[in-house]
Image (spheres, grey):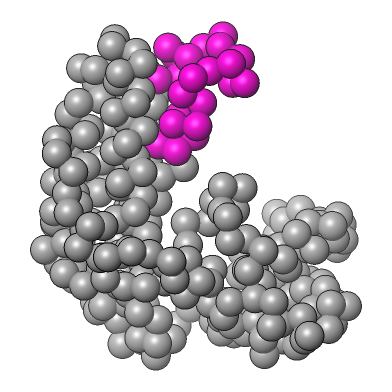
Amino acid sequence: MDIKDRFVPNIYEFCDRWCEQCKKSHLCMNFFLMERMKEKADIVAKEVGKKKPEEDGWDHLRKMLGVAYRVLKDVVNENGLKMEDICGFDHLKKGLMAGGNEEKLEEEERVEKLIRTSDALNLSLVYEKLGDKCLQRVLEVEEGIDPDESPVCLDVETVTWYVELVHLKMWKALYGLYSDDEEAKKSNYNGYVKVALLAIRSSLKSWKTLARQYPVLKEHVLPLIVLLYEVEKAIVREFPDGWSFKRPGLDDDEVATEAATALPPQ
């Protein structure tokens, strides 16, 4: 069997990047290549080195990307793959190598103005900032507790992992919605919306568990829970097809969409 037949095409495009918790990582070419790249990390670090004071930022970035690209090509070849199998990497390389230009910057400004009008995006940013503050309180309560003995260790990891992800995925979804960039249009932005919605559901569950385990946190956590419900409602209003999107390889075994989309009781 061809090695690339082991993987689901584009499975990594609409995931939450939490590989350690993913049950489908064995189907992901991105995860496979990242693990191989980690074995060669010392090569990249040695050849790139530190940015010199007189070195232009773009030049250093091109150098870093060039070395990483060459090492990746070696990894790809060693494992019987081809660069055309790596979706998106060539586009990323070309974009970074090209640097900035006035026309592209004007387009980015136009899109950014539209993105910033989104209620879902703005609410998710509020959640990110308040969530970070609440996490500091959680860590104070958990201070001195061995993670292996903490009854809420996974819940702390969950809210920590997702506190910024909702905002980031919504930005990416809105960019795909408003941008004229061909590559952005090819990718279904509802996939990013689905990731954000699932992150919200996981975060809600974990925040509630934290509040039950540590009553002293309730006054900090309960407003966050209310806010997260509002974030989800805003997302669904702006992207009504978000929940119904089937992410390749990740939602193949998903049951009825109606059950997944119903908001749980607050």
Quadrant location of the N terminus? bottom right
Name the residue at 54% across, 68% down. Answer: 12
Q: Quadrant of residue 246?
A: bottom left
Name the residue at 77% across, 80% down. Answer: 3
User: At which x and y percent is residue 248?
Assistant: 47, 75
The number of numbered discs placed on residues in the rendered structure image is 0
Q: Is residue 157 magenta-colored?
A: yes
Q: Which residues are magenta?
A: 138-160
Name the residue at 84% across, 77% down. Answer: 79
Instruction: Out of 244 and 228, give the one closest to the viewer.
Output: 244
Report if residue 70 is visible in the image.
no
User: At which x and y percent is residue 46?
Assistant: 87, 57
Q: Quadrant of residue 128?
A: top left
Name the residue at 17% across, 49% down. Answer: 263
Instruction: Out of 76 and 68, give the one closest to the viewer.
Output: 76
Q: Is residue 60 above or below residue 21?
A: below
Instruction: Out of 108 and 7, give the one closest to the viewer.
Output: 7
Report if residue 1 is visible in the image.
yes
Q: Is residue 109 left or right of residue 263?
A: right
Instruction: Out of 244 and 67, give the one closest to the viewer.
Output: 244
Q: Is residue 40 above or below residue 144?
A: below
Q: Is residue 83 left or right of residue 89?
A: right
Q: Is residue 63 left or right of residue 8?
A: right
Q: Is residue 228 magenta-colored?
A: no
Q: Quadrant of residue 77?
A: bottom right
User: At which x and y percent is residue 13?
Assistant: 49, 71
User: At which x and y percent is residue 103?
Assistant: 36, 86
Quadrant location of the C terminus? top left
Q: Is residue 22 left or right of residue 213?
A: right
